[in-house]
Image: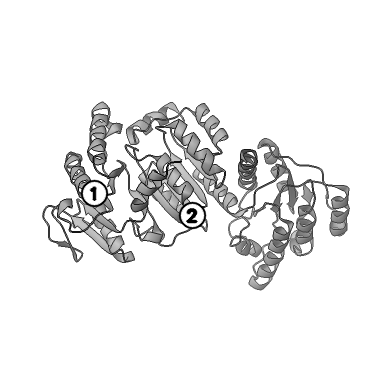
Amino acid sequence: MKRDITEQLRPLFFPKSIALVGISEVLTNVSYLFLNTLLEVGFSKIYPVNPKGGEILGVKVYPGIKDIPGEVDLALLTVPRKAIPGILRDCAEKGVKGAILYSGGFSEAGAEGKKFEEKIVRIANKGVTRIIGPNCVGTYNPSAKLIPQTILPKESGPVAVISHSGFLFYYLIMLIAERGLKPSKGVSCGSDCDLTCVDFLEYFGQDPDTKVIVAYLEGIRDGKRLFQVAREISKVKPIIVLKGANTDAGRLASASHTGTLAVPTAIWKSLCSQAGIISVDSFEQMMDTMVALHHLPKAKGRRVGIITTPGGLAVTATDICNELGLEIPMLTAKTKKQLSGVAESIGTNVNNPVDLGLLAALDPERYIKESIRIVARDPNIDMMFVAFTGPPLDDDVRDKRISDLLLKEITEGGKPTVICGSIPTGWPRGELRFIEKSNVPVYPEPRRAVQALAKLAQYSEFVRQAR
């Protein structure tokens, strides 16, 4: 992969200075909101730009880009479309490293807009200026205090975000934070007129702070390069993608939204399979998969050991495993004998799935803990699905003790394990509150838990075969 792309993108994620072109004191002005946030987080070199000059929020306003005395790494352009060519010409001459085009009216508007888009790219590229967008909100990096909106997390984490949609970019960042992780960096890249989603994917692939990459994409300008870049990155870190524009109506909406070229679904699925991209069908599935791939070790195979207290969850999980291509193998004779010793007093099933019955939920440190220990050591098992529920219990001391015991067995067993809570709202099962804060994913219902295991198995297979 080309090193020059990552070198060009670094100042766009670690800018030492930012120009906000088109700023005004209107509270809904995007540059004004950006300035307010940058000041709040302590970003030092900010250059508001407006022909009227003056001062905004105590910061000097410059009439134009070229009037700024120092170097400019990144410029946010929130100006009318007709003003963009002249401003980009100034950016190129000034040596601005990157320009974010917030406004629309380019390739998504038709042939004339496409020509205009090509024109401004030529203007910017006469210097060192690279364009992000149009139709985007640009880059985000909390570790560099590059935060466009005050609602976004101020602390960094392990997940990078790429989105063709500005709104869904913010939505993804907030979802990631809600699931207990935080973004490392992110970009809303809009129409990909110059820098594309593949450029940003390449950058995140080499970013040491990024462990998982999630993306919402509507189309790809260079499918061959995406395949080459994604295949190399997928060997070392997961790429999880939700692709929009999968129907004729969706493709039409995408063309009028970002102007990117939608990829037919069959071609997309083939590309994902060969490149190691984990394709998902919803934002919920993206977050579920993200949590599993970030926290869990890779699976050695598709064989699942199921342990439940309610019998209905055993049946449901088995059906879903079969539907998604996971296997429910027989346990060894040694395992079944050991399980019989644990479950003998409650007369339950010790085959796979292991159905402990609701009574086991009353004493999880005896029945559930021991069952996890035994099944995790079975050589026929690659992954585990554990579901327990029962009478509502909410005793912090007891719950913490039990969760620690269960987590200890899961860790020592070494098998990727997911927990299925399946508890009604207002029906506390205190152990789950503590387990959710650990590296063991907890899901509210069987399908989501099993889907996460299926995606983990898929990614693990790709990594094994790509070595």
- In the picture of the structure, the residue carrying the numbered disc 1 is 95
Examine the image and state in which quarter residue 61 appears: bottom left
Q: Residue at x 19, y 50 (%)?
A: 22
Check disc 1 and report its element: helix, strand or loop: loop
Q: Percent from the top left, x then y, of residue 362?
A: 75, 63
Of 110 and 228, which appears nearest the observer? 228
Check disc 2 and report its element: helix, strand or loop: loop
Q: Percent from the top left, x then y, of residue 127?
A: 24, 43
Please identify the residue farthest to the left as the structure is shown: 52
Q: Percent from the top left, x then y, of residue 166?
A: 36, 45
Estimate the spatial distance between the alpha carbons at disc 2 and disc 1, rounded to whole Å.
28 Å
Q: Residue at x 33, y 65 (%)?
A: 41
Sequence-earlier tag: 2 or 1:
1
- In the picture of the structure, the residue carrying the numbered disc 2 is 208
Residue 281 in view, yes or no: no
Please identify the residue farthest to the bottom as the structure is shown: 397
The relative height of residue 463 versus residue 74 in the rendered view (above or below) is: above
What kind of residue is marked 1? Gly
Of 459 and 408, which appears nearest the observer? 459
Q: Percent from the top left, x then y, of residue 156?
A: 45, 59
Residue 185 is left or right of residue 91, and the answer is right
What kind of residue is marked 2? Pro
* Closer to viewer: mark 2 or mark 1: 1
Q: Residues within 10 Å of mark 2 (few under 14, many from 20)?
A: few
Examine the image and state in which quarter residue 463 appears: top right
Q: Residues within 10 Å of mark 1 (few under 14, many from 20)?
A: some
| Quadrant location, the C terminus | top right
Residue 118 is left or right of residue 144, and the answer is left
